[in-house]
Every structure is written in structure tokens, then in C-alpha cells.
Image (spheres, helix red, strand yellow):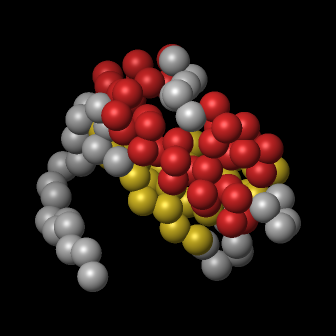
Amino acid sequence: MFIAVYRWTVKKGREEAFVGAWHRGTVSITKIYQSYGSRMHRAGNGDFIGYAQWPDRAAWEAAERAGFRHDDKEAARIFYDAIESSDTILLMDVVDDLLELRRP
């Protein structure tokens, strides 16, 4: 398994729109590129941190080459319009996995 970690600084007042668009886009990306989904976090400084899981580095690289394009054009527009800055902060291979999916 392969992990990509992203950081976004979002324009003030656009946070809710950003999260909604991220959610919609991630659902679409998961279907199109066969990723394992993602989690969104909020850092203490207000930045958003996304943690995406992929079957392997090759799958992530193929999606990246395609620009992570997906079929929800409105979500993509809202997402990019809300971003002040963004970067990929980590690319990692999983060496052991003890996470358990538990939903409340």
C-alpha cells in the first residue's frame, strides 16, 4: 500500500465549501482511479491535511499524471477556488498496518 499526504491552506470563509468539494471529489477519484479513499484532518494552525491510501505507488502516479481529474466538475471548481496554497508533504510506502475501520 502507498500513502500520499497533502496540505491545503484554505481561503478564510471557504472552509466548509472546501471540505464539501473535497469529499465529493474524493468519492469520484476513488471510483475512477481505484484508490482506497482518504481522510481529511484539520491542523492546529487551520490548515487541512489529507491522507490518501493507494494500492501502490504506480496507481498514485497514474492518477497524478492524469491530474486527479474526475467527473464532478463543479466540486473541482469549488475545491480549487477555495485553496490559497497546497502541497504534497509526504509520499510513503506502508510497511505495517494496524488501523481498524470503526464507524460510530
The residue depicted at 68 percent of the width and 46 percent of the height is 79
Q: Is residue 83 above or below residue 31?
A: below
Outermost residue toward the bottom?
A: 104
Lateral position of residue 77 relative to residue 96, left or right: right
**In the picture, which quadrant includes the N terminus?**
top left
**Residue 40 percent coordinates (x, y):** 49, 62
**Residue 84 percent coordinates (x, y):** 81, 50
Q: Is residue 42 above or below residue 32?
A: below
The residue depicted at 16 percent of the width and 58 percent of the height is 97
**Residue 57 percent coordinates (x, y):** 32, 29
Q: Nearer the viewer, residue 52 or 31?
A: 31
Total marks placed: 0
The residue depicted at 20 percent of the width and 67 percent of the height is 101
Residue 76 visible somewhere in the drawing: yes
Lateral position of residue 24 relative to residue 79, left or right: left
Outermost residue toward the right?
A: 12
Q: Nearer the viewer, residue 70 or 84?
A: 70
**In the picture, which quadrant includes the C terminus?**
bottom left
Q: Nearer the viewer, residue 102 or 2?
A: 102
Lateral position of residue 46 relative to residue 28, left or right: right
- Quarter of image, res 42: bottom right
- Quarter of image, res 17: bottom right
The residue depicted at 51 percent of the width and 17 percent of the height is 65
Lateral position of residue 23 relative to residue 59, left or right: right
**Residue 75 percent coordinates (x, y):** 63, 42
Residue 85 visible somewhere in the drawing: no
